[in-house]
Image (cartoon, coloured by chain):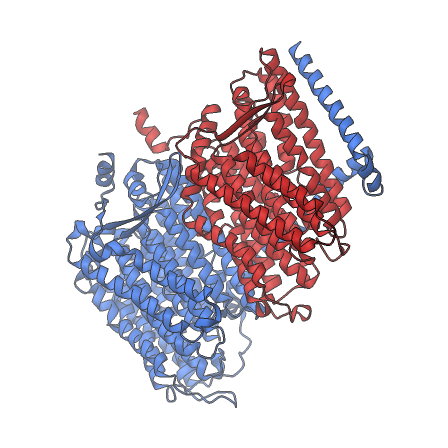
Amino acid sequence: MLTALIAIPAVGALLVALLPKGRDALAKQVALGVTLVVAVLSIVMAVQFKTDGARFQFTEKYWWIKQFGVHYAVGVDGVALVLILLSTILVPLVVLASWTEAGRSGGVDTPPKRSVKTYMALLLSLEAMMVGVFAATDVFLFYVFFEAMLIPVYFIIGSYGGAQRSYAAVKFLLYSLFGGLLMLAAVIGLYVVSANAGHGTFLFDELRNLHIAPTTAKWLFLGFFIAFAIKAPLVPFHTWLPDAAGQAPAGAAVLIVGVLDKVGTFGMLRFCLELFPGASKWFTPVVLTLSVVGIVYGAVLAIGQVDIKRLIAYTSVSHFGFITLGIFAMTSSGQSGATLYMVNHGFSTGALFLLAGFMISRRGSARIDAYGGVQKVAPLLAGTFLVAGLSGLSLPGLSSFVSEFMVLVGTFSRYKVPAVIATVGIILAAIYILWMYQRTMNGPTAEAVKGMKDLSKRELIVVAPILAIIVALGFYPKPVLDAINPSVKQTLVQVHKQDPKPTVAEKGSHQ
Amino acid sequence: MTTMNAVLAAGGPELHPQAAEGVQSVAWLLIALPLAGAAILLLSGRRTNKWGHLLGTAMSLGAFVVGLLAFFQMLGQDAEGRSRLVHLFPFISAGSLKVDMNLLVDPLSISFVLLITGVGSLIHIYSIGYMSHDPDRRRFFAYLNLFVAAMLLLVLADNYVGLYIGWEGVGLASYLLIGFWQYKPSAATAAKKAFIVNRVGDFGLSVAIMVMFATFGSLSYQDVFGQASQASQGTITAIGLLLLLGACGKSAQLPLQSWLLDAMEGPTPVSALIHAATMVTAGVYLIVRSHAIFELSPDAQLLVTIVGVATLLAGAIIGCAKDDIKKALAGSTMSQIGYMVLAAGLGRPGYVFAIAHLIAHGFFKAGMFLGAGSVMHAMNDDVNMRKYGGLRKVMPITFATFGLGYLAIIGFPGLSGWWTKDGIIDAAFEKGGTSGQILGWLALIGAGITAYYMSRLMFMTFFGEPRWDEDVHPHESPKVMTVPLILLAIGSVAGGAFLILGDRFAKFLAPVVGEPEAAHKLVTPYTAIVFALMVVGVGLAYVQYLRRPVPRTAPAGNPAVTFARKDLYGDALNESLLMRPGQWLTRLTVYFDNRGVDGLVNGLAAFIGGTSGRVRRVQTGFVRSYALSMFVGAALVVGALFLVRI
């Protein structure tokens, strides 16, 4: 099943790439068809997933490089499952959003007539790797997917991005390579440790039970953690993100910020915490500090942005702070909330980027001050943008609220001060979202905006499912939480952490 | 068992609601009907333009009928059976955090349900006429329905998370409705300001919820209140103060009051429903609902009363200086909610009057706002009272209904406000001690100022010589607008007596907030003083605004008048203390991030490989250097590992 989910888009990518020149329409149709098939299959898999079953399901395991103990091993737990679903649902929508020339460009300065089929092939190959990276249960395989993902993204930003695409693409690549390098070292180190213990392996299940000397564990933790912190990104490793997201075509920005970055936070939860529980606890104060700084710092930066896409990127820096905060709070509520946050953030930021992209493609500028009074001429665009924005500021009733609430409550029960400072983020979020909304959508209609067309049917079909998911999960997050909770429980057992007892109950037990 | 002990210790009423039956078991319809209305109206687009307003009104009326049926069913129960739980669905669950979506139908929540859906429906009907020329009337009704649904969730939830969802939901509706005419920059700014200031309050509410979970391991009212007495004094006070911060935001109490005056940018029915009768009273609901917390913390209670008194005076003073009829009424709303907050802080003798005044205020203030809307319709949407005058003859129904609301708010004996406001003042004096005396006298003075500014408003609008602009031809409003005015006026006249006579409301609320120790005395020594101050206030306004002609342009006032006109410099304070430093901080941070963090990284990159100028070389050479750097890095770390081993 999982192999099929990886192979279908990969084969699709090849197929599209091999299409003869000029068959753009066909390339788009094939891409859409393939991604829809993948989406349906992944939903079928989700339905079959047993929340009370074994932790990893749909597992497959074959030797890959026997000499080095490398397996092709895949399987999903609840966390990986929901993230795969997030990816496979977003990709067909991104394909549909990239239907037109404007949808595939990162700005007015993108050279026209870039190849359609290459773009679609890159998207498809990216999808294969995204599924792979979440499904891999062999650390080496994970690493391979983790690094291979860079290549399609690099080319999408570099060829289809805005005026500063080369700069953004190279910056993205250098940051990621640096992280990847550290991680590779740590992966090899991990193998060495396991080999010294008598049995060299990269399998997650086996490494999980490996005893690692504390000092070694700390170094290995750092190797993984820095790679993930760059990917996530955590302050101070964040500066590549606004450039990459600001220059990339909107659809690609959705995948970069919505899905790719989750690999970082997913990695922290899955690999850092479970492989190096002791080291994770040792580094917790540092990570919590960085998270809280990120929440406030990212939000303040978002307020000060003049470019819509960069603004959304900075809001994500703030939101990633919440996610890492929840993960390292080491409570069930914090970690389940953080995982749910990954999913919710993917959808709400995805919707924001897509809608911002639609708007920018009409006006040809990403600057906030190039707009004004859009609501009067394009009420649908403004209305959907508002819903996506409100999800971004975690309005109760929309999905992000549930996850943010869980993270905050879960963090507070163990770390009071970080949780309270993080809560300031809810005020700042209201400022950055509503101020941007006011400057673009409200007020008298700007001269250059007059005559702007409202959302087309195709564009509406792209955002409607996302908004529907945002509302549905806002009121009924149970299905996702049911999938996540058992996995999070395992993680907490592995790090030997129990939820703090209510202080009232604690007092009672002392008496 | 522990819960029982806690209840006995707190001396509070029984906290074990039974499962709902009959109509009450479908109490979710209360929320579902208006929510469905909002969804249909928003999603259907222009197709429902023709009858959208009727659907919206029908949904609100439907909720009112369900509310009435549930209320009558409740009356048939004994005290223990009056609190009923409606289980809906499990909402959040992770580890020890479990939150269920349940509704609590009890005397307190049903009082609000009737107020929200009753006054709400009247305002829906009124809006059919008031918004008849607006091209976006359908959207307006969608937002009104959304508001009603959210407000009902706020009061019906049986836990703090549900309350919080409704709390922010009404904030959203308020944002959308203040900014309904969003093409006006002032409206858009006011909407945003309201939301952001409210979020400051929500910060408090959020942290309060976190403390509650960390302390009690649950967020349902039943668990929190049941265990409240076991928590430490510091914790309880902290929760109380954080809840108070939330209440200050939503109810426009000092220091978070500044958004309410700007909120008058919204259409007038919105000011009546959201910014007078219902939403802004949510803070009072929060405090009364959480009475088990506040009763355990005298410090928190004292602060509640201080905030209430300070705001009731500040709002009244602002009300004196405004020429804009809606802003004068908004100042008055602040002030009247100040009375309610004061009462809520006074503990058991105060709760009944807090809620009774809230309901009475819902009638007379909504009536006066709608009356103001009727006047504005007649005056071509001019809000400047200096250009009104003599309207009583051309708008007799508006005048009569507004006049009854006026008599109710100034506490004319026998009308609603007299029963409820006097009760609050008495309760303040009954508190005893120096604090009781100070609170009582300040509340008394506030009553005098209320009589002054409301008489000023009344005289400037309906009495004296007409000072109308030339193209203005005032006329009475259509029936669809005057009928709600009449119904609200009836409530303004009779509501107070109905609730207070024979301690009817006190007995009704007793299962939730407990019974006051002593029966309420209708006439106390203070009654006479209040009456005297009221006469002085009216007289002063008579001398200034009826005996003398009112100038069409506001005269330059002394510093005190300017102080009041500028909303006691609340905005100036916010601007210099928060906004300006905030803007500087933002600019500085952006500069730092671009030059500092990113500059450092870019400089490093340039140093190592050269990015900006030599992009191409990096691109072509990247595979090789990547492989090389990977190898070197890996070797280094493996080497380090061996070193550590040795």
**Residue A374 % position (x, y):** 60, 66
Q: Quadrant of the N terminus of chain B?
A: top left
Regarding residue A304, the answer to whether it shows in the image is no
Question: Looking at the image, which residue is at 33% across and 77% down?
Answer: B485
Chain identifier matching the blue colour in the rendered picture: B
**Residue A146 % position (x, y):** 64, 33
Q: Is residue A441 above or below residue B485?
A: above
Residue with the most extreme top position: B646
Q: Quadrant of the C terminus of chain B?
A: top right
The one of B61 and B350 positioned closer to us in this rendering: B61
**Residue B33 % position (x, y):** 34, 62
Q: Is residue B490 above or below residue B72?
A: below
Q: Is residue A404 left or right of residue B369?
A: right
Question: Looking at the image, which residue is at 41% across and 38% down?
Answer: A482
Q: Quadrant of residue B642?
A: top right
The one of B215 and A75 positioned closer to us in this rendering: A75
Regarding residue B635, the answer to whether it shows in the image is yes
The mark tally for this picture is 0
Q: Quadrant of residue B439?
A: bottom left
**Residue A270 % position (x, y):** 54, 30
Question: Looking at the image, which residue is at 43% across and 67% down?
Answer: B41
The one of B82 and A391 positioned closer to us in this rendering: A391
Chain identifier matching the red colour in the rendered picture: A
Residue with the most extreme front position: A20
